[in-house]
Amino acid sequence: MGLSTSPTVPGPDSLDPAIDDLSGQVLELAVIFARRAGRTAVEMRSEAVASATTKSSPTDPVTAADQEAEAIVVDGILRHRPDDSIVGEEGAQRHGTSPVVWYIDPIDGTTNYLYDIPAYAVSIAAAVDGVLVAGAVFNPVLDELFTARAGHGAYLNGRPVQVRPPVPLSSALVATGFGYQAERRRLQAVALTRLLPAIRDIRRFGSAALDLCALATGRVDAYYEVGLNVWDYAAGWLLVHEAGGRCRDLVGDDPSPRFFMAAGPDLIEPLAGAIREAIASAEGKSLSTTQNL
Ligand code: IPD
Ligand code: CA
């Protein structure tokens, strides 16, 4: 099986027992190394500012801890499962021979980390044959561990969690985020001013992985963002799925780096409609140009 950068979530049928068993094993590893990498990030916090450089734009930071945390996760996983594939934010890329692919964001919310805002997390997901089966997101400052395993529900520190009960769009608290490119941000901001009057309010926590965990635990009603990467959302997508929520793109296909939205089953379509309108009016033209957003 090749290295898939577009995994999906499981369908309604129960998992093959062998894959179900494997999902338990990989979740255990995800938890061990999410905790270990998260603790290391906290220990290295005092070096964050001095070690920071930038990546895709002058506002896209990376620190020594991002690299160290990724090395901890990758080395740890490969020690136990040397044949698996790896896709990591800080450059880890490995084509293995097994059907398991790992998606690793060693610190999601690096800007928060840089500023010592306690909203950053290690995010680790595993897919088997392109289907996400395990995900762990660990916020080491708040000691919050979010986990999900295909067909077994979503959990915060071991307690089962669910998305919130349905609300009308006008009462929805919606998390979102912005990309690192200035022109894309300008369009995102314009679209947001169109959406804001139609909802309760927005939240910008600064970590896509934690935004999705917030949705899965009922702390927000919905989430959307343009321009994520698979490591930002792989674990959070499974969390939302297992917590009873839906994740998709603007037209109803699987979410992708191009567009990711998530909400409870009743809110997802009204929210998609409102975002489509907001984008169309922000651009002043047709939806076909949303790739700029
Ligand atoms: C970022 C965060 C942020 C989102 C950006 C991501 P990083 O990841 O998830 O909330 O708005 O799109 O790139 O750079 O902190 O790992
Ligand atoms: Ca990230």
Image (cartoon, rainbow, N blue to C red):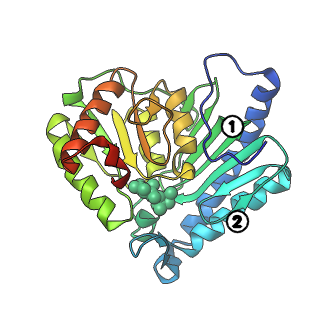
Q: Quadrant of residue 69?
A: bottom right
Is residue 119 something one can see in this rendering?
no
- The amino acid sitting under disc 2 is Ala
Disc 1: residue Cβ within 8 A of ligand 2's nearest atom: no
Residue drawn 51% across the image and 34% down it: 254
Of pointers 1 and 2, the one earlier in the residue sequence:
2
Q: Position of residue 245 (x, y in %)?
A: 45, 27
Find residue 152 and name its label: none
Q: Position of residue 225 (x, y in %)?
A: 38, 47
Residue density around tag 2, few if under 14, some if 14–19, many if 20 or more, within 10 Å: some
Q: Nearer the viewer, residue 257 or 145?
A: 257
Q: Quadrant of residue 218?
A: top left
Is residue 285 something one can see in this rendering?
yes
The secondary element bearing badge 2 is classed as: helix
The secondary element bearing badge 1 is classed as: loop
- The amino acid sitting under disc 1 is Gly
> Which residue is labeled 2 in the image?
71
Q: Nearer the viewer, residue 88 or 207?
A: 88
Residue density around tag 1, few if under 14, some if 14–19, many if 20 or more, within 10 Å: many
Outermost residue toward the left in this view:
197
Q: Position of residue 258 (x, y in %)?
A: 45, 47
Q: Nearer the viewer, residue 76 or 270?
A: 270
Q: Position of residue 102 (x, y in %)?
A: 69, 48
> Which residue is labeled 1 in the image?
130
Tell us which disc is closer to us: 1 or 2.
1
Residue drawn 78% across the image and 54% down it: 95
Residue drawn 71% across the image and 63% down it: 72
Outermost residue toward the bottom in this view:
50
Residue drawn 78% across the image and 37% down it: 25
Q: Is residue 33 left or right of residue 41?
A: right
Q: Is residue 20 left or right of residue 205?
A: right
